[in-house]
Image: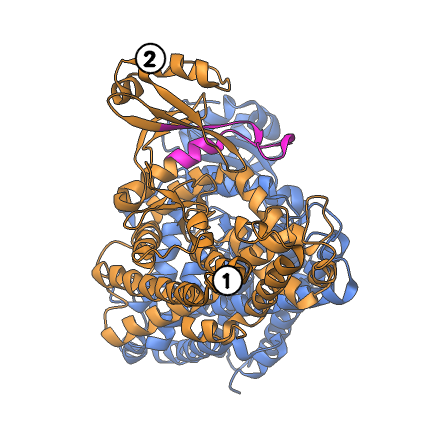
Chain colours: A blue, B orange
Amino acid sequence: MAFSEFRPLDEKSLIEYIKATHVLFNKVGNNYDKLKIKEVGDGNLNFVYIVVGSAGSFVIKQALPYIRCIGESWPMTKERAYFEALALKVHGQLCPEHVPEVYHFDRAMSLIGMRYLEPPHIILRKGLIAGIKYPYLAEHISTYMSKTLFHTSLLYRTTTEHKRDVAEFCGNVELCRLTEQVIFSDPYKVSQYNHWTSPYLDRDAEAVREDNVLKLEIAELKSKFCERAQALIHGDLHTGSVMVTSDSTQVIDPEFAFYGPMGFDVGAFIGNLFLAYFAQDGHADSFDDRKSYKEWLLRMTEDTWNLFHKKFTAFWDEHKDGPGEAYLPAIYNNPELQQLVQKKFMKDLFHDTLGFGAAKMIRRIVGVAHVEDFESIKDNSKRAECERKALDFAKLLLKERRRFQSINEVVSAIPA
Amino acid sequence: MAFSEFRPLDEKSLIEYIKATHVLFNKVGNNYDKLKIKEVGDGNLNFVYIVVGSAGSFVIKQALPYIRCIGESWPMTKERAYFEALALKVHGQLCPEHVPEVYHFDRAMSLIGMRYLEPPHIILRKGLIAGIKYPYLAEHISTYMSKTLFHTSLLYRTTTEHKRDVAEFCGNVELCRLTEQVIFSDPYKVSQYNHWTSPYLDRDAEAVREDNVLKLEIAELKSKFCERAQALIHGDLHTGSVMVTSDSTQVIDPEFAFYGPMGFDVGAFIGNLFLAYFAQDGHADSFDDRKSYKEWLLRMTEDTWNLFHKKFTAFWDEHKDGPGEAYLPAIYNNPELQQLVQKKFMKDLFHDTLGFGAAKMIRRIVGVAHVEDFESIKDNSKRAECERKALDFAKLLLKERRRFQSINEVVSAIPA
């Protein structure tokens, strides 16, 4: 460990840090003249350096004690790096094929050294904006979600393991508070950080703030988010937290990880696919009307849930005689009952997924942090039109999620 | 602190302990010849000594590293004393009128020194068996439940306070595991500890173990118990955890305390009132047919919920502009919406209450630990008859709780 006290690194001090850190030193080799360092953090919170040497490469991610995109006026504990590293390790053990390896963690420095996801890896959201189809996306992300969520829940684990880890991740309270504020609170009240495509959506934003039924539903979801320790969730699983190539899918940035409701992760991903879908009309041009891509996105959404459902229940079947506390084999030991409890569980999880997904959509349109899918539509009027369709659909989902029995029904409910 | 390492006290070493412990020493005065010590632990888990001296009195409760009523073959962490002392302090600060004061806690010795609830205080369960009416019971217990549950929930507290305390009480995992086993698991499977009034209830016990719908419902409640950190609950609020006189009601023994669903406490109390009710026919004799007492018990049950509802929502109204994270004033700021969210919250809590109450009833009839209400009925056939009625009603409640809108409807559903 190079420094015993926190200090933000720059490109120069980073080299000193690498020299002093065995595992990093070994990765890149000792030819420091050839070392290439590039700051690439385009996220909202942290500094990210790509380090490429003669022998290899890695990424350095350092958390600063405030939110980068807003500045020192919005403090945010740098301890989030600890929980991010921990979640990367836990999820990485469960699903190494879709989680980048952690090489090094320095708690004092809030610094993670991890695999560099080399080109042609790009952020999934950018790929979706560009209209690129990823044939393995639903397959991969459903594997990641089913593996991480199932194996950190009481379907697989004992109460003793569960409560120990729940307690540990209660420490990530600052990041939970941020989510509570920006997803479950700010969009439903007047807040200095909220913004939207004005003046087009002024009435729409106001309508969200005045919709009693919407507020009733968001309260139920917020309470689940705050109180229900169902599994170790990623906590921020939108399409900006996934890096892809045509055949690789890597989930990054789990700094919001804690024991929360599974539907928050599944919903985040599906909600962001819907956002990508509703943004497509804004990306259409005379060369590509995006019709085929919109269909692909909807099929991806359906596949994501359906494959997740299939894999999750397959893990359940596989481990139904294991030590998981939730459904003891001595009680749930007949096939008919096993089917009954799975059906109920998956139905509830589906409705959670739709609710949280809708909440994630709403906040991206009238809350503080927007998505590039819409932001990259230059024509304000066109952007507002896309956003309004997304917002209206999200409101429908949030209010009426319990009437949907399948993801296909949900997709069919999108106005033509 | 008298000893730095754990050792079980007997009456002799207890005197040495008191002499060496300032706060206890001061309570009873220095006339040790007059000191009266009596072991009275009739519970399942601990040793309890009453200590009365010339200047005052107290109770010493010591947890042993196993379950007293079963013996060293069922180990149980003595750290439960720490969580009991902590819960007594937290709940005592919120509701000093119904929680005995803690004078002394010794973590190494797993020992609590607390107020002696002097005669005529008796265990409520014994009073209900004897047919004694307690005019303030519903008033007092609803005060205790509403004060402790409201003020330890996110209706009143911030996320930061909440997660800190949730993490702390995750340490009480052994006691949570015990509850999971004896309430949510054992009654629904073959277990060496289960017993019932045999042979009368053999078929009834078997029917519980073969009832798929019942198992589906108990799974939902178990998951809430394991995952939902809603408030600091007592965790074992049956009528054996309450001491009463005609005008005093004191809640003791919160060693099962943790952050769990509110309905588990309210349901425990109401479920045990129902058990007391169904046992009355077994206590009837030619002098007292217990008809009037049965009516009083049902009225108590109704009053307990209705007063709890009234006081809980009054606290909510009082603190609706406070720092509680669940319903921020800037969002839930109109009277119509406030009413809407309260109604939904209280309906959900009511159904939780009925479900958990029913689960507590069932486990007392076919599980490991029974209640004196039934055990004191000497005639096996008559006891079985009372137990079967209670069991059938509990099964109905567990399965159909969502169709009840009010406690009066529930009481009306009891077969005449």
Would you call the spot at circle 1 few (<14 residues within 10 Å), some (14-19), or many (20 or more)?
few
In-image side of A91 versus A3 (left or right): right
Residue A100: where, in percent of width, then height? 60, 44
As for residue B70 lying within the magenta part, the answer is yes
**Which quadrant of the figure has residue A190?**
bottom left
Q: Residue at x 45, y 67 (%)?
A: B291
For disc 1, the marked residue is B286
For disc 2, the marked residue is B33
**Which quadrant of the figure has residue B55?**
top left
**Which quadrant of the figure has residue A307?**
bottom right
* Residue extent of the magenta highlight: B59-85
Question: What amino acid is at disc 2?
Answer: Asp
Label 2 marks a residue whose chain is B
Q: Compared to B272, does A287 lie above or below?
A: below
Q: CA distance from mark 1 to mark 2?
A: 48 Å
Q: Nearer the viewer, residue A405 or B166?
A: B166
Residue at the bottom extreme, as displayed: A416
Mark drawn on residue B360: none
Q: Is residue A379 visible?
A: no
Residue A404: where, in percent of width, then height? 57, 78
- In terms of sequence position, does the residue under pointer 1 or pointer 2 come before the other? 2
Q: Nearer the viewer, residue B368 or A285?
A: B368
- Quadrant where the N terminus of chain B sits is top left
In-image side of B177 versus A323 (left or right): left
Question: What amino acid is at disc 1?
Answer: Ser
Label 1 marks a residue whose chain is B
Q: Residue at x 53, y 87 (%)?
A: A416
Residue A247: where, in percent of width, then height? 69, 57
Residue B169: where, in percent of width, then height? 44, 40
Would you call the spot at circle 2 few (<14 residues within 10 Å), some (14-19), or many (20 or more)?
few
Which element carries disc 2, helix, strand or loop? helix
Front tag of 1 and 2? 1
